[in-house]
Amino acid sequence: MTDYVKSENPKVENVQWDWDSVEIETIQPDAGGIPTGDKYQSLDIEGGFNNITDSNFVLSFGFDNKTLYPNMKHKSITQPLRIGGNLYE
């Protein structure tokens, strides 16, 4: 997980995970507020980076419906890297 976050931005040297933020949520895809497709579950975890107090992002994993475990191959940063609410570039 840490290597993935670091690969998304070469300025990220280290990652801090907020293990208390781990959450499983049900997602309903939509198109402009109109539900489309089947609902699915996502496991989300928040983190920070470079030991910056106001830094944050959210990493999400899709679930494997057969095993009910997060699918490590299907992950994405769903809330981009930010510091104090501003995008980190």
Image (cartoon, helix red, strand yellow):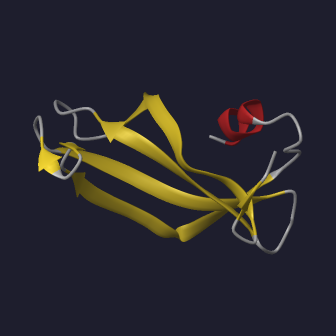
Estimate the x, y position of residue 62 in percent, counting from the top left: 34, 38
In which quarter of the view is residue 9 placed?
top right
Which is more toward the observer, 55 or 36? 36
Estimate the x, y position of residue 42 in percent, counting from the top left: 32, 48
Quick check: 77 left or right of 15? left
Which is more toward the observer, 36 or 44? 36
Which is more toward the observer, 52 or 2? 52
**Residue at the far top in the pictured view:** 73
Q: Is residue 44 above or below residue 55?
A: above
Estimate the x, y position of residue 17 in percent, counting from the top left: 65, 61
Q: Is residue 74 above or below residue 87?
A: above
Q: Where the C terminus falls, by quadrant?
A: top right
Residue placed at 84% from the left, 50% from the top?
14
Q: How many marks?
A: 0
Estimate the x, y position of residue 29 in percent, counting from the top left: 21, 43
Q: Is residue 82 above or below residue 41?
A: below
In which quarter of the view is residue 87 placed?
bottom right
Residue placed at 20% from the left, 44% from the top?
30
Quick check: 78 left or right of 5? left
Residue placed at 86% from the left, 67% from the top?
52
Residue placed at 66% from the left, 33% from the top?
4
